[in-house]
């Protein structure tokens, strides 16, 4: 566990496939290689734990990097289970790629959302800055004043940390 930004960012998991952390009332996840069931399952416990500190609810922000592989069926099931958590108040996925693969990543995220039918807002973005603005706006509805640039800085820091720890694909 590593804390950054005046103890606001807490890095809770990092492996060759992903990095996961919390800041504000948001669970941040960056998927760089494989999207795995176990990592999603651990995120459920993380989200529930974060919600204990934020009784009005939490947000979730994912970045699926361009080199990430699509989740298998078990990971998609865990993704859907994660989206059904009653503590979540907003959820977004960002993929900054272009072309067919980017469209398929965004379609998977939208499809899982359609199947899970969560009661909260969900968005798919093509830029972290846009996702951060959206998350900050959602948080304002929860009475929070988190700055979108601080949210973006957390996500970009997690992305950088993962690349520094795992510079090349296995």
Image: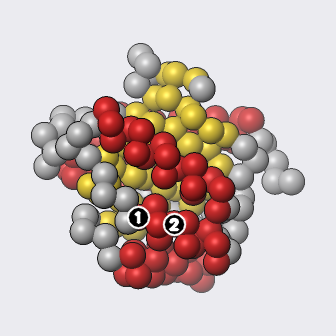
Question: For the residue carrying disc 1, how many other residues have a C-alpha within 10 Å: few (<14), some (14-19), or many (20+)?
Answer: many
Name the outermost residue toward the right.
170
Where residue 72 appears, as percent x and y from the top left, is 67, 74
Snapshot colouring: secondary structure
The answer to whether 28 is drawn above or below residue 8 in the figure is below
C-alpha separation, residue under disc 2 versus residue under disc 1 = 6 Å
Secondary structure under the numbered disc 2 in the rendered image: helix
Quadrant in the rendering for residue 65: bottom right
Image quadrant where one finds the C terminus: bottom right
The answer to whether 88 is drawn above or below residue 148 in the figure is below
Where residue 64 appears, as percent x and y from the top left, is 57, 60
Say the numbered circle drawn on residue 12: none
The answer to whether 97 is drawn above or below residue 25 in the figure is below
Where residue 44 appears, as percent x and y from the top left, is 48, 52
Q: Residue at x 52, y 50 (%)?
A: 43
Q: Is residue 134 left or right of residue 112?
A: left
Q: Is residue 83 left or right of residue 14?
A: left
Tell me if I can see residue 110 in this picture.
no
Secondary structure under the numbered disc 1 in the rendered image: helix
Q: Which residue is mark 2?
A: 79
Q: Residue at x 13, y 40 (%)?
A: 143
Q: Is residue 127 left or right of residue 102?
A: left
Q: Residue at x 67, y 40 (%)?
A: 14
Quadrant in the rendering for residue 92: bottom left
Q: Is residue 47 left or right of residue 68?
A: left
Mark 2 touching mark 1, by CB under 8 A?
A: yes
Say the numbered circle drawn on residue 83: 1
Front in this rendered view, residue 130 or 50: 50
Where residue 82 appears, as percent x and y from the top left, is 46, 61
Question: For the residue carrying disc 2, how many other residues have a C-alpha within 10 Å: few (<14), some (14-19), or many (20+)?
Answer: many
């Amino acid at each position: 566990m590593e804390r950054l930004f005046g103890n606001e960012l807490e890095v809770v998991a990092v492996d060759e496939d992903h990095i996961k952390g919390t800041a504000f009332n948001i669970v941040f996840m960056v998927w760089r290689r494989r999207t795995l069931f176990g990592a999603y399952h651990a995120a459920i416990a993380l989200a529930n734990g974060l919600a204990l500190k934020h009784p009005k609810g939490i947000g979730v922000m994912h970045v699926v990097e361009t080199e990430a592989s699509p989740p298998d069926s078990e990971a998609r099931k865990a993704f859907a289970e994660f989206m059904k958590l009653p503590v979540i108040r907003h959820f977004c996925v960002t993929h900054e790629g272009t072309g067919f693969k980017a469209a398929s990543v965004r379609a998977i995220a939208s499809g899982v959302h359609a199947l899970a039918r969560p009661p909260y807002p969900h968005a798919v973005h093509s830029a972290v800055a846009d996702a951060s603005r959206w998350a900050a706006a959602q948080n304002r509805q929860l009475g929070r004043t988190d700055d979108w640039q601080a949210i973006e800085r957390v996500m970009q820091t997690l992305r950088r940390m993962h690349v520094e720890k795992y510079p090349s694909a296995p």
